[in-house]
Amino acid sequence: MKKSLVALAVLAASGASFAQVTVSGALGFSFQKNATTPGTAATKGMQMTDGKINFEAKEDLGGGMSLTAAQSFNLKGRDTGLSARDASLTLATKAATLQLGAIERCTRIDNVAGAPVSLATGHDAGTAGAPLDYSTFTLDGSCHNVDTAAVSLPLGAVTLGASYNEVSGVAPGAAAGTANSTGGNVGGVNYYLLSADYAAGALAIGIDYRTVKADNAANTAFSPAAFNDGLATTSLSASYDFGFAKIGAGIKTANHNAPTQTTFSVAAPLSSAATVGLIYSNRASVSTDAAYFNTAVNSVSATAIGIDYKLSKLTVLNASYGMYSGLNNSPIDNEYRIRLLKSF
C-alpha cells in the first residue's frame, strides 16, 4: 500500500499540468450484535466496521472549469481484500456540473436529518426486515450500483438534476455490484432520474422521479415480466434545522403495487461534543399481485437511536441501538453497536 501511495504521489506531481491530489478516509472498530431472525444464533463480537480510503485529484482547466477524478476503496485490515467503491469523473463549469462514473446511488429518504446512528443492518440493508430494502422488489430497494451520466444545474436556491443510469451486475449470472464498465449494460436494466432540490437557510426540500426499463427476458430478476420493467417511483424529502434540533422526513411511492416507504429522523446536539438522534422507517403492507411478485408482505418498521461523542474534530465514539417489527411472522430482532471512528 505504501508503494502505491508513493507511486500515486509521483504521478500526480510529474504531469505536464499539476493536479491537486487529496487522500482521505476513515477507520472504525466496533463491538456489536447484528439483527437476526429470533431463535437463531446471535452474531456478535468485535470487528473493523469501517476502512475507507478516498483519492481525489482536481485540476483547474481554466475558464472557470475544473475536472475532478475520485476513487474510493474499502480495506479493513488483516484477511480482508481491497474492494473498489465509487469512482467518478466530475466536470464543473460556470453553468453546470457533469458527473460520469460507477457509483452507488441511494434513496433520498433515508435518515434525512443525519441522525448519528451506526448499525450493521440498519434501515436500508439487504434484508427483508429492513423497511427501505427488500430483495423481492429489487430496484425498489434503497441502494444499488450504477454506471451513470448525470448533470446538475444550480439556479439560486434551486438545483435541478437529471441522470441516465445503467444498473450494475444485472447480466444473467452476474453478481450484484459487478461493474458494467467491463462489458456494458448486458442485463439491459436502466433508468432515468429527474430531481429538484431547494435549500435556503434552515429549510431543505427535494423531490425526484425515476422511470425504469428492463430489456433482457433471459434475466428473470429484471425481465419485462418482473417487477422492475416500467417501475416509476417518486421520492420526496424535507428537513428543517431549528437550532436545538434538525428534523427530517421522507416518503417514496411507486406503481406496480410496490409498498409505500416513509421515514422520520431527528438529530439534536446536547453539547459541543455530543449529539443524539433517532430514525424511524416504515414499509407499508402490500397484497398479492402475481404480475409483479407472488406473495403479500406485511408492514415492516424499524426504530433506531444513537449518540455521537466527539473526542476530537476527527475522532468520534458512537453508541447505537435498533429494533424491528413486522414482516409476516418472522421479524428480525434487535441490534446494537459501539464504534470508535477515526477520520483522516
Image: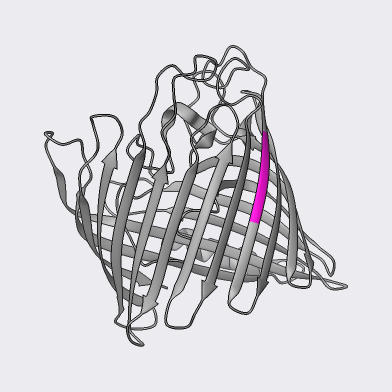
Q: For residue 265: magenta? A: no
Residue 4: percent from the left, percent from the top? 48, 58
**Picture quadrant of residue 217:** top right
Q: Main secondary structure of the magenta part?
A: strand
Nearer to the camera, 21 or 337: 337
The answer to whether residue 252 is seen in the rendering is yes
Q: Is residue 247 left or right of residue 297?
A: right
Q: Residue at x 32, y 59 (%)?
A: 118
Residue 94 or 127: which is nearer the viewer? 127
Please count the marks in the image.
0
Which residue is drawn at the image coordinates 55% and 15% (left, top)? 291
Q: Nearer the viewer, residue 269 or 25?
A: 269
Asked if residue 66 lies left or right of residue 71, the reply is right
The part of the image, by quadrant, that contains residue 332 is top left
Q: Residue at x 47, y 32 (%)?
A: 176
Q: Quadrant of the N terminus?
A: bottom left
Residue 224 sits above or below residue 153 on the image: above
Q: How is the image coloured?
A: one colour
Quarter of the image for residue 53 reads: bottom left
Picture coordinates of residue 277, whole percent (x, y): 35, 68
Position of 320 compared to 70: left or right?
left
Name the spot of residue 273 as percent of width and height, x first. 33, 84
Looking at the image, which residue sits at the far bottom?
272
- What segment is highlighted magenta in the picture? 207-211
Q: Residue at x 48, y 29 (%)?
A: 137
Q: Pick the quarter of the image with the C terminus.
A: bottom left
122 over 1 or under it: above or below: above
Name of the residue lying farthest toward the top = 218
Q: Residue furthest toward the right?
A: 63
The answer to whether one can see residue 124 in this image is: no
Counting from the top left corner in percent of width and height, residue 97 is at 76, 61
